[in-house]
Image (spheres, helix red, strand yellow):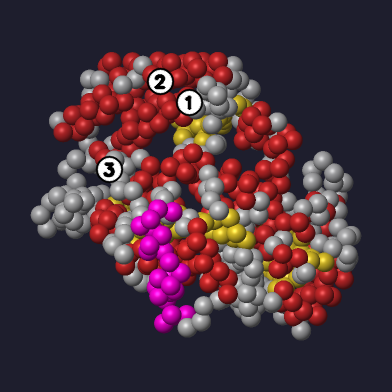
């Protein structure tokens, strides 16, 4: 921590900026967190769910803001969490990703989001907001909601935003100001967010359409270069198996890189802009194709870099990997085969590190092994795991001794169905006493099986189906509908709150270890070896388990239990628990006895 930060971030100064009006008493772990920040500056903190992490982050940013240090960012997973933080602290300015803002250019003919339109190519858009003045390009035009939000963010002291917004505005935007302070909430997810944001898909269909458009505007040279890359891609993929997604070999990657490097992305962009100005492309009629073409031209340099990072470099292993997948299109489109290249980022730690200013506070309820956390996320800071404010007597972590191991290599064929039925009957028994449950599974196949069993057993189960979304199903359950809420860990494993004994019992079916046939798994094994991979896979499973456990105990008044069904949890569950939670663990009961313990807890 430099001298200026050390002068500002004293404990007394931090406590002076604690929001005492909202929170008349500071919790012990909040004070301890502020003491650590005053001592060390940047910190990675493991703070239990409901312990007031947001207030800690806000206090740090507010302290910096009042010292005229900025810009300052509070980064979290999604719009819902952004809104929660903004509601708690109204002096923050919220900004979301482009997918949350309407585009005014195509209205009233079409209602579209900003991420669905070829924004850069809309040269005549009067709604665009000058980021220096805040004024629209066109007189009396309604300002673009997205660019207005970006402008407001630039003018504010503290911005709360999604991680993807922060990533793109600070990694790819030109002349982005270096933040003076950054708070990262749910920091364990940072690597996945960056990986997903930096993954690209190239299809033969879109490349063919781009070639067609380029020829139509007279850009024959550029069209020929793109056609060469397309022909090269199809030639490589025609040699691959079409059964499952497959990793490309190093020699194939090098061939694709050589084909891409022949394309001048800047020249493509210039030809496209010139054609639009001359009216050769109708920005309204050709919206979809223009968006695709824009993606290709503007992402071209990223494709090249992504391909290059998929090969070993001097002194390093591959950082990305490239897979391909194919699928037959519908009969309406002639049943043609679609070729797809999918470029996925993997080792994103250096990028995350690049995004972190000198003062960064990262926290999560689930960090676990700080070394693996740092390797995965790039957030390598002084680490502390702080105790919860909740009495451990208010919660149970139950690992029944009479359930099977549901790992694919170990389970007997009928075991998953049998244990799902046992789980359903426990849910019914609890429901008869007005105790509702959340059941979290790994796959949609398991979810559908459990829902079918619930129907057979006469249990009112709520889930997302027939067009309803996970969010809508959650809202129905929160309103009091149903005995059981059912969903996959991807939808209900984190980011949802069921406080006040809304669902005091949570069942988690099995650990979500990776599919050995998945290209990501293949890449990890190839890059690290299976032994080292298992350490990371186990850490991810631990984080997932701890996140699921935290869905129903959100305050010191909540009481709740989590039952981990598969014996696959037994090898790591107790070790993964924070010290304050270990005494809540029971691994010596049958499933029926676990139900009895729950009834005793909740009576």
The quarter holding residue 92 reads bottom left
The quarter holding residue 117 reads top left
Q: Mark 3 or mark 2, which has the lower sequence index?
A: 3
Q: Mark 3 or mark 1, which has the lower sequence index?
A: 3
Q: Is 165 placed above or below 475 here?
A: above
**Residue 73 in the figure: left or right of residue 420:** left
In this rendered view, identify the residue nearer to me: 267 or 423.
267
Q: Residue at x 43, y 72 (%)?
A: 12
Residue picked out by circle 2: 260
CA gap between label 2 and label 1 equals 9 Å
Q: Position of residue 288 (x, y in %)?
A: 34, 39
CA gap between label 3 and label 1 equals 26 Å
CA gap between label 3 and label 2 equals 27 Å
Q: Would you say residue 454 is visible in this rendering?
A: no
Find out whether the residues at labels 3 and 2 contact each other: C-beta distance under 8 Å.
no
Q: Which residues are magenta?
A: 1-23
Q: Is 570 placed above or below 335 here?
A: below
Residue picked out by circle 3: 175
In this rendered view, identify the residue nearer to me: 417 or 54.
54
Mark 3 surroundings: few (<14), some (14-19) or many (≥20) residues within 10 A: few
Residue picked out by circle 1: 307
Q: Residue at x 47, y 83 (%)?
A: 24
Secondary structure beneath dot 3 equals loop
Q: Residue furthest left?
A: 139
Mark 2 surroundings: few (<14), some (14-19) or many (≥20) residues within 10 A: many
What is the quadrant of the C terminus in the image? bottom right
Magenta stretch containing residue 20, yes or no?
Answer: yes
Find out whether the residues at labels 2 and 1 contact each other: C-beta distance under 8 Å.
yes
In this rendered view, identify the residue nearer to me: 352 or 25.
25
Q: Position of residue 505 (x, y in %)?
A: 72, 70
Secondary structure beneath dot 1 equals helix
Q: Residue at x 40, y 75 (%)?
A: 16
């Amino acid at each position: 921590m430099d001298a200026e930060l050390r002068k500002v971030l004293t404990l007394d100064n931090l406590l002076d900026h604690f929001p005492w009006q909202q929170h008349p008493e500071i919790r012990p772990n909040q004070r301890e967190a502020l003491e650590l920040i005053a001592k060390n500056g940047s910190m990675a903190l493991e703070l239990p769910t409901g312990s007031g992490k947001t207030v800690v982050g806000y206090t740090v940013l507010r302290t910096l803001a009042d010292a005229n240090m900025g810009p300052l960012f509070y980064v979290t997973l999604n719009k819902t969490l952004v809104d929660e933080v903004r509601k708690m602290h109204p002096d923050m300015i919220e900004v979301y990703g482009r997918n949350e803002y309407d585009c005014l250019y195509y209205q009233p003919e079409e209602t579209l989001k900003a991420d669905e339109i070829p924004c850069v190519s809309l040269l005549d858009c009067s709604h665009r907001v000058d980021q220096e003045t805040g004024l629209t390009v066109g007189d009396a035009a309604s300002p673009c909601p997205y660019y207005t939000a970006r402008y407001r963010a630039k003018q504010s002291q503290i911005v709360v935003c999604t991680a993807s917004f922060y990533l793109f505005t600070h990694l790819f935007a030109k002349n982005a100001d270096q933040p003076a302070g950054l708070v990262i909430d749910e920091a364990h997810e940072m690597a996945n967010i960056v990986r997903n944001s930096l993954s690209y898909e190239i299809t033969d269909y879109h490349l063919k359409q781009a070639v067609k458009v380029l020829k139509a505007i007279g850009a024959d040279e550029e069209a020929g270069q793109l056609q060469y890359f397309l022909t090269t891609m199809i030639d490589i993929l025609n040699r691959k198996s079409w059964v499952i997604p497959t990793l490309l070999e190093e020699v194939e990657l090098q061939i694709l890189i050589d084909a891409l490097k022949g394309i001048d992305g800047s020249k493509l962009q210039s030809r496209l802009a010139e054609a639009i100005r001359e009216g050769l492309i109708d920005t309204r009629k050709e919206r979809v194709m223009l968006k695709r073409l824009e993606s290709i031209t503007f992402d071209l340099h990223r494709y090249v870099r992504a391909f290059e990072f998929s090969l070993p470099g001097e002194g390093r292993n591959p950082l990305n990997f490239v897979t391909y997948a194919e699928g037959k299109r519908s009969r309406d489109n002639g049943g043609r085969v679609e070729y797809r290249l999918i470029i996925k980022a993997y080792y994103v730690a250096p990028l995350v590190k690049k995004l972190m200013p000198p003062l960064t506070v990262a926290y999560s309820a689930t960090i676990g092994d700080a070394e693996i956390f740092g390797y995965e996320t790039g957030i390598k800071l002084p680490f502390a795991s702080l105790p919860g404010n909740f009495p451990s007597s208010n919660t149970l972590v139950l690992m029944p001794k009479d359930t099977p191991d549901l790992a694919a290599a170990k389970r007997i064929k009928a075991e998953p169905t049998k244990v799902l039925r046992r789980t359903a009957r426990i849910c019914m028994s609890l429901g008869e006493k007005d105790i509702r449950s959340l059941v979290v599974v790994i796959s949609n196949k398991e979810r559908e099986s459990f829902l079918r069993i619930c129907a057979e057993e006469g249990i009112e189960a709520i889930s997302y189906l027939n067009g309803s979304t996970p969010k809508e199903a959650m809202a129905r359950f929160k309103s009091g509908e149903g005995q059981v809420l059912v969903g996959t860990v991807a939808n209900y494993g984190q980011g949802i709150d069921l406080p006040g004994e809304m669902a005091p019992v949570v069942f988690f079916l099995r650990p979500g270890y990776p599919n050995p046939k998945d290209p990501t798994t293949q890449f990890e094994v190839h890059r690290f070896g299976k032994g080292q991979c298992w350490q990371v896979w186990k850490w991810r499973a631990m984080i997932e388990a701890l996140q699921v456990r935290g869905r129903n105990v959100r305050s010191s008044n909540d009481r709740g239990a989590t039952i981990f069904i598969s014996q696959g949890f037994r090898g790591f569950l107790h070790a993964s628990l924070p010290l304050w939670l270990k005494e809540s663990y029971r691994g010596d009961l049958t499933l029926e006895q676990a139900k009895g313990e729950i009834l005793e807890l909740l009576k």
